[in-house]
Amino acid sequence: MSAPVPGEVKVFGPEESPSYWQPVPANGFVRCILNPKTVQSESRFAMGTQTVAPGCHIREHTHDRHEEVIHLTAGKGFARIDGEDIPMEVGSTVFIGRDRKHGFVNPGPEPMSFVWFLMPGGLENFFAAIGRERVPGQPAPEPFPRPADVAEIEKRTVFGWADASHNPKG
């Protein structure tokens, strides 16, 4: 009987992963750090960070086949879970099971940043499809709209339902 092969170890620096500017209403940017394209793991997942611009939000949505963890690392705001606003500050962590309606709001004057972890993964594909590539050091672009086919992108990636109020008319 052969000995088990040790798993992979990788370290990523602050700007060593794919990153995308995000459209309205979130604005800000994401970093897609760990996912099947960047690491080999036995369990499928995706992990990254997201920064939501001041006065912006992540619209309400569900994940019908995924569980999500959010851990706030900068700023403050609130999680809207099934219609209830729950305050979040640095160090707050939220676990969101499948099919729970949720969104995140940054009402303040400073950016709100968090680590996201999605099981079994796929959120990185959504961010790449709707965002614009972010190059370290470049200034944030002017707010830009979501793609005209955002509803189709949501369906083929990780969403069960999403608030369509910010979708382009098409």
Image (tube, helix red, strand yellow):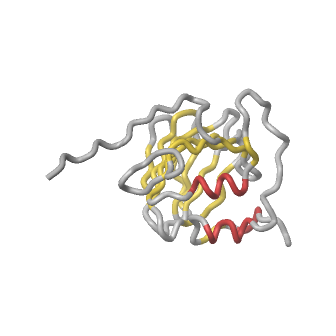
Residue 30 at what x, y percent from top left? Answer: 63, 43
The x, y position of residue 10, in whole percent, is: 44, 35
Query: What residue is drawn where x is 58% and y is 45%?
Result: 32
Which corner quadrant of the image does residue 125 belong to? bottom right
Total marks in image:
0
Residue sitting nearer the eye, 39 or 49: 39
Residue found at x 39% / y 36%? 9
Q: Nearer the viewer, residue 30 or 82?
A: 30
Which residue lies at the image location 71% right of the left edge and 70% below the top edge? 151
Q: Nearer the viewer, residue 117 or 80?
A: 117
Q: Is residue 112 left or right of residue 169?
A: left
| The image quarter in which residue 20 lies | top right
The reply to whether residue 55 is visible in this rendering is no
Q: Residue 92 placed where, x, y %?
A: 45, 41
Location of residue 146 by image quarter: bottom right
Residue 138 drawn at (x, y percent): 78, 30
Q: Residue at x 19, y 46 (%)?
A: 3
